[in-house]
Structure formats: structure tokens, C-alpha cells
Image: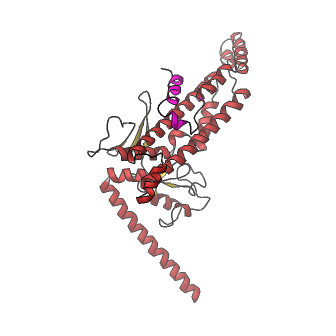
Amino acid sequence: MKFGQTFTEYLQGEQERFLVKCSHVEYKRLKKVLKSCKSCRALQDSSCNEGADVEGDDAVASICHCESCPLCDQMFFSELMKEASEISGFLSSRVRRLLHLHISKGLQKYMLQLYHCFGSGQHAMVQEVRILIDYVIMNAIAMQKLLKKYDKVHSSINGRKFKTKLRSEHMELLQSPWLIELGAFYINSTTLDNGDSPEDFRQFSCDFTSTQPVLTLMLPNSMKLEYNLTCAVCLDTLFNPYALSCGHLFCKACACSAVSVMIFEGLKAALPESKCPICREVGVYANSVYMMELDLLLKNRCKKYWKERLNEERAEMVKQSKDYWDSQTKFVIGFGN
């Protein structure tokens, strides 16, 4: 079955009521734009005709290199950027809401569940997580196929350049930290007593036994995407993980150390010009996010390691606090003299 038909069936499937409330990639319409662009056809036909009259290396150089088409670009890339932004924003707000519901207690949790479409507790949340994961996967694949089609039609690399732009703008859906949180939430919520997941809950899985701990997302056609859960600073499995706004994950203590702030101060105390240790992007600490579900997953699957790291972090926090207050006391005493 072609992806276009699969995507249409997805939009008209059981989750149609959910999809009415959110944006999605206009796959069918944008593909028609690429097929019907007369300017592209004219350029390609003329380029190919010129190439037919030339031999050897000159022919290769002259065939179909219309790097971009203003008519396509005006609608195509601006529309895709708008859709990617809306999908990313929707995913972020929905996951935040789910996590808030998951950690709330007592009357607050009861009221939130009533508000949440009268959902039946944990089962309703797991169902929404599955819908959100499918939502991200389907829209990400639709975007990738459209960009690939654009490059094929225009004999260009502009589609690939646009993917790089999405990554730099933190809107590449399959690399979103919120998708990792959904995956961790999914595993935490569906794991059986023996540590396995039911057969119908195999979309996300994790492996902490190999040299590199990974979270794996199964994509259609038996493809898979792996998220490395190793901190780039300490080179160990993430502990108390935080995602910077650039999308990179670090242990909280390691990220604090990288920007010379104390653990008890938190990442938001970092200077505005502080850079990510991996991509060197500036200003990524102010909107850092605690990866609560990922931390819970690590706590459940690596209990001994998690406790060891917890004790180490607490000891380091006590030491930093003592050093800080000692220095403050010395400053005050010296100032008084």
C-alpha cells in the first residue's frame, strides 16, 4: 500500500476525533503542488532537451538542475514549516498536560481526569500516549517523503537542507525530547510484573544491558530509531536527565558542571551565553526540561545504578552547599571588618 493511502486511512481512522483538534501535514495537497507545477516541468523539459544535444561530460552537467522553483517554494516550504511548528507545539503542550495528570494526586488528579474527557484513569492516558506516538510518526514520515519528492522533482538538495533547518529550529519530530518522554511513559505504564510488555505494546522498547543504553522506537516497514541514553559529559547512563532546548540530554549534575553552576541552583541559573556541550548552541539552558518519565524508567530498570548515582549526587550537593555557605560567611565577615 502506498504511503499516501496509508496516511489518508490514518487521518480517517479511530483517532479521527482526536486529529480534528490538531494540525497535520497536508500530504495530499502538497504532493499535488509538486506534480502540477508547470514551471518545474518546463524547466526540466528544456534542460533535458539541451542535454540531448550535448555529449559526454557536458551532457551530465546540463541535465535537469533547476535547484529550486519559486512557485513551489513559496507554498511548499513555508507550509511545511508552519505545519512542523504547529505539530511540535501541540506535542509539547499535550505531553506536558499528560505528565501533569500522571504525577498529580488526590482531588487534583480526580478533577483532572474528569476534565480529561472523563477518561478511565491510567488506561485512558496510555491510549492517548499511543495516539500521540502514532501522530508523531505518521506526520514525520509524511514530511520526509514530501521533502524527498521535492528533491526528486527539482533535482536539488533543498529538501535535505530544509530537514537540516528543521533540526536547527528544534522541530524535527522524531528527534523531539517529548517523543522520548512519551516512549518512557509508554514503557512505564505498560510493563508487566516480569519486566516485559504485552505483545500489542511493542512500539517502544529499551535496553540497558548493552554497552550503550538505548530507547528504541519501531517505525513502519520494520525500520527503527534508537535514542542513545548516554550522557555526553560523564559518558555513563543518564541520571536525573534534563533536555536542553536544543534537544540534547544530560545528567543534571553534568549539565550544571558544564556551565559552572551548583546543582541546587539548577540549570536555569546558567548564564544566557552558556553553550550546549554538544552542539555549542547558546541560550539553551533557560527552557531546559526535567525528563521525569525517562528518570522513572531508569529508576525501575537500573535500580542499583540509580541508587548509587542518587547517593553521589546528594553527597555532591551537600558539599557544594557547604562550600557555598562557607564562602558567603567569609565574605560577610570580611565585609564587616
Q: Which residue occupies 45% across, 70% down?
A: 320
Where residue 136 appears, as percent x and y from the top left, is: 51, 37
10 inside magenta stretch: yes
Above or below: residue 71 compared with residue 333: above
Q: In this view, does 75 lie to the left or right of 163?
A: right
Where residue 63 appears, as percent x and y from the top left, is: 67, 17
Q: In which quarter of the image is the C terminus?
A: bottom right
Q: Which residue occupies 42% across, 44% down?
A: 124
Q: Which residue occupies 55% across, 81% down?
A: 331
| Residue sitting nearer the eye, 164 or 130 | 130
Quadrant of res 183 = top left
Q: In this view, does 140 lie to the left or right of 55?
A: left
**Residue ranking furthest to the bottom:** 337
> Which range is magenta?
1-26
Colour option used: secondary structure
Q: Is residue 55 left or right of residue 179?
A: right
| Residue sitting nearer the eye, 158 or 113 | 113
Where residue 73 appears, as percent x and y from the top left, is: 70, 30
| Residue sitting nearer the eye, 159 or 102 | 102
3 inside magenta stretch: yes
**Residue ranking furthest to the left:** 194
Please state the total of marks drawn on the protein image. 0
Residue 265 appearing in the image = yes
Above or below: residue 311 compared with residue 89: below
Where residue 336 appears, as percent x and y from the top left, is: 58, 88
Residue 233 appearing in the image = no
Above or below: residue 183 compared with residue 224: below
